[in-house]
Image (cartoon, rainbow, N blue to C red):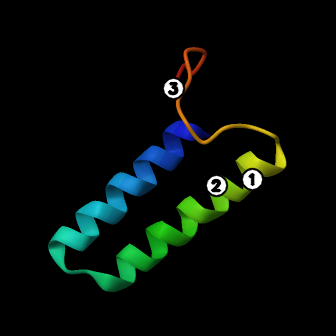
Amino acid sequence: MRSRLAREQQLAQDAVERGWPREVERHNAIADRIRSLLADLGESTEHGPDDHC
């Protein structure tokens, strides 16, 4: 799930660079939801040595 978070953050940054505010909002919302799910699971949002994705 952390790899998906990183991907959403990359997509949000790409949308910023392209001037697509609605896409920035969408990708940031998805990233926020992933962070929330990770917190609910007691997981870190940082990549660790055991991440396989």
Q: Residue 45 in the image: x percent, y percent?
A: 60, 42
Which circle's residue, 2 or 3, is located before the other in the chain? 2
Count neighbours of disc 1 (C-alpha within 10 A) and say few if under 14, some if 14 to 19, many if 20 or more: some
SS assignment at label 3: loop
Residue shown at 25% from the left, 72% from the top: 16
SS assignment at label 1: helix
What amino acid is at disc 1?
Leu
Residue 53 relative to residue 36: left or right: left
Between label 2 and label 3, give the one nearer the viewer.
Answer: 2
User: Where on the picture, by quarter, is residue 36?
Assistant: bottom right
Viewer-proximal residue, 40 or 23?
Answer: 40
Q: CA distance from mark 3 to mark 1?
A: 17 Å
Q: Residue 13 in the image: x percent, y percent?
A: 29, 62
- Can you identify the residue that label 2 sits on? 34
Q: CA distance from mark 1 to mark 2?
A: 5 Å
Residue shown at 19% from the left, 80% from the top: 19
- Can you identify the residue that label 3 sits on? 53
- Can you identify the residue that label 1 sits on? 37
